[in-house]
Amino acid sequence: MNSAEWHARIESAGQVAGAGFLVTPRKVLTCAHVVRGSGGADALTVTFTERPGSPAVPARVIADGGWGGGATDLGDLAVLELAHDVPIAPAALAPVDAAHGQRPDRPRKLVVYGFPVGYDEGTLAEYRITAPQLLNREWIQLEAWQPGGQPLAPGFSGAAVTLVETGEVVGMVTAAADATGVHNGRMMPTEVMARYWPDLEGLVPTSDHGAADRARLRALVERTVRAGLDVDPVRRVRLYEAARGPLDPDPPEEGFDSLWSAALFVLCEIDGADAAATVARFTAQVDAVFQAPAETAAAPDWSPILVHLQHSGAGDGHVRVEVSAYSGGRRHPVGSETVPQAGVRAYVQDRIEAAFRYLTPGCDELIAFALPRDWIDLPVDRWASAPDDDTPLGSVYPLVVTDQARLRPGTRHQLTRAWKRLDTLPGARVHRVECGSPEEPARLRLRLRKPDACLAGFATAPAEARTRPHFDTSLTAPAPVVIWSRGGCASGPEEVCAGGNGCAGKTFLDELDACVSGVPPAELPRQVLALREEAEAEDGHWARDIQLLWDDPRVFTDPHVGPRGGGAAHAHSPVA
């Protein structure tokens, strides 16, 4: 059951209707009776509860088994198509007859994950098959693994029945026993499901040999899917060519549209005595590809220019500005002055230009603005890059912002530890903070402090009252990366947005997820620069107002807290 993010909860008009499971990035299987009478086209949604925080995905029925509506009618199968692909590795199907075990007196333990009343986040039940006989050529009877186990109550319908050892799917729960206290039910095995939906045939392996290698291959591919990492189409074919045996089929003419599709081809399309050997070779090829980046990953060699903007204390019309350059293992103060608001942009332009004299030749420049939290949404990336060039600064250089409160030593220590872990990740996984129904701030904090946390993406700008506590929590957790759109969702407190299609915040998060999921966290400033360049050239681009809070303390070799918390840091500045 490891990494089983493909388990699905089916909802109709906002109510839990049953379970299902993902079989392709866009297809979910469930029972026809789960979705019967689901109402309008927008009433059916699918939620992947093993990926907390992910939004419900709209779905529609595209195929069924012709179920007549009665408890004993055949064809109780429905195929749902999601509104978009989801970044989750689909369920793996076990070979035919794998559920029965090798010996009749030693049945295999089977696990079911469903959503009965009171268990909206799901619960497990353990079952077994005591006889391989098909009832009415349609079902196999399930019996509780132990007396007193969880009965197959309503809410388990449509759930995948999986092998406890490998997590492979052997069938789908279709019905529970009618009598109270009877702990058995029925499942439709995968070969019967394929009879009603032929597209499933190519996903069912023909051999049970090499189960360990198949499980390892799925684990590798699931890891790359979760991290948003993949290889290019040409390399996918080369991986297969390097693994295939002399009797194995040629790769499809159109190639493989993902690493997962290549793995499915190896698992499901190759049969014969040498199938297990091909799976083992392909697994080794994939493992070699994705072990190398983790071992050699390193932070980019940035040469940053840090711009501090602070409330001056000299009145609302003035700003305290400090500019420093970092290179050669030390900080070089460039300028520090209290400037009238009207002159801040010109002063920053001038000092940034001067700061380039200190940067390490051949290194990549990075412009970083340290801002008070109430200025964190300041559009500094839109400031003109030079007096005679109105190209936005953020479209010329990689540009990030950070919260000045995060410059404290304790927070820098936490962030440094977090970034050492992020160096091993091949992609930036987005934790979505939706505009419609954000999780509680305390729960968000727990989520962002987990080892796999990287990037908090907001559908709404920080100034919005309904998400401000969540934004503050992200900064103090501390999340290494936070991204939002200054435009974001425009709904106000009197008009709460549901986050559906047409919402600017949802569009932003969807596009963001697609663009950064395969980018190493250390490379995000470059990726956002590319997005800003696209937005500058294209009207209405979703990333025009993107704001990137990116904070790697290792880039700044001599951090300081500014004139209010460490004025000695500027003792040698010629303008201090």
Image (cartoon, helix red, strand yellow):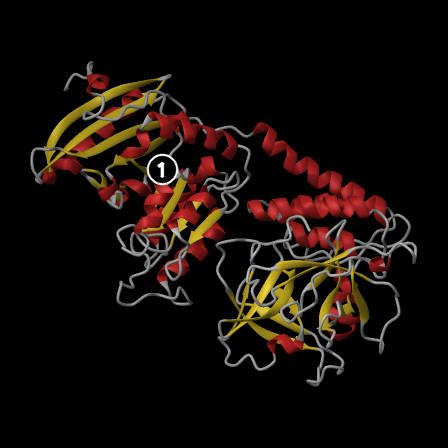
Furthest residue to the top?
572
- The answer, for residue 231, to whether it is visible in the render is no
Amino acid type of the residue that numbered disc 1 sits on in the rendered structure: Pro
Tell me where residue 117 sits by quadrant. Answer: bottom right
Q: Position of residue 224 (x, y in %)?
A: 61, 45
Pick the front one: 249 or 39: 39
Tell me where residue 213 sits by quadrant. Answer: top right
The residue positioned 53% from the left and 45% from the top of the image is: 518
Quarter of the picture holding the C terminus: top left
Would you name the residue on which mark 1 appears?
398
481 is higher (above) or lower (below) than 561: below
Q: Is residue 106 left or right of residue 22?
A: right
Q: Is residue 432 left or right of residue 376?
A: right
Pick the front one: 537 or 31: 31
Q: Position of residue 257 (x, y in %)?
A: 63, 55
- The answer, for residue 64, to whether it is visible in the render is yes
Pick the front one: 368 or 436: 436
Q: Position of residue 371 (x, y in %)?
A: 25, 37
The secondary structure type at the circle numbered 1 is loop
The residue positioned 43% from the left and 26% from the top of the image is: 301
Q: How packed is label 1: few (under 14 Cα within 10 Å), some, or many (20 or more)?
A: many
The residue positioned 63% from the left and 59% from the top of the image is: 123
Q: Is residue 343 left or right of residue 82?
A: left
305 is higher (above) or lower (below) than 568: below
Q: For the image shown, how many numbered marks are present on the structure?
A: 1
Q: Position of residue 164 (x, y in %)?
A: 75, 52
309 is higher (above) or lower (below) than 436: above
Pick the front one: 387 or 221: 221
